[in-house]
Image (spheres, grey):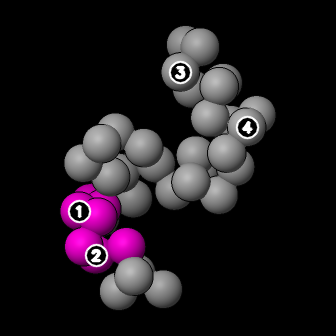
Amino acid sequence: HKLDFTPLGIDTRGKVVLGYSEVELCMKGSGYQFIHAA
């Protein structure tokens, strides 16, 4: 599935150029607000 995220610019760690990690993409809600809250 990495091929689908390649255009987004995900690093080896799984971080997108926008600063969103795979965890945030998969968990748009609890994980999204949790990281941004910090």
In this rendering, the answer to whether 26 lies above or below 6 is above
Cα distance between the residues tagged 4 and 3: 11 Å
For residue 36, the mark is 3
Going by the numbered disc 4, the residue's amino acid type is Gly
- Residue 18 visible in this rendered orientation of the protein: yes
Cα distance between the residues tagged 3 and 1: 20 Å
Q: Which residue is mark 1?
A: 9
Cα distance between the residues tagged 2 and 1: 5 Å
> Looking at the image, do the residues carrying marks 3 and 1 touch, with CB atoms under 8 Å apart?
no
Task: Tell me where the magenta segment starts and ends, as one range.
Answer: 5-11
- Residue at screen point 65% across, 58% down: 26
> Looking at the image, do the residues carrying marks 2 and 1 touch, with CB atoms under 8 Å apart?
yes
Q: Report crowding for label 3: few under 14, some 14 to 19, many 20 or more residues within 10 A (C-alpha).
A: few
Q: Earlier in the sequence, mark 3 or mark 1?
A: 1
Q: Quadrant of residue 33?
A: top right
- Residue at screen point 73% across, 37% down: 29
Going by the numbered disc 3, the residue's amino acid type is His
Cα distance between the residues tagged 2 and 4: 23 Å
- Report x, y in % for residue 20: 42, 43
Q: Secondary structure at mark 2?
A: helix
> Looking at the image, do the residues carrying marks 2 and 4 touch, with CB atoms under 8 Å apart?
no
- Report x, y in % for residue 16: 32, 52
Q: Report crowding for label 2: few under 14, some 14 to 19, many 20 or more residues within 10 A (C-alpha).
A: few
Q: Earlier in the sequence, mark 2 or mark 4?
A: 2
Q: Secondary structure at mark 1?
A: loop
- Residue at screen point 59% across, 14% down: 37
Going by the numbered disc 2, the residue's amino acid type is Thr
Q: Which residue is mark 4?
A: 29
> Looking at the image, do the residues carrying marks 1 and 4 touch, with CB atoms under 8 Å apart?
no
Cα distance between the residues tagged 2 and 3: 23 Å
Q: Report crowding for label 4: few under 14, some 14 to 19, many 20 or more residues within 10 A (C-alpha).
A: few
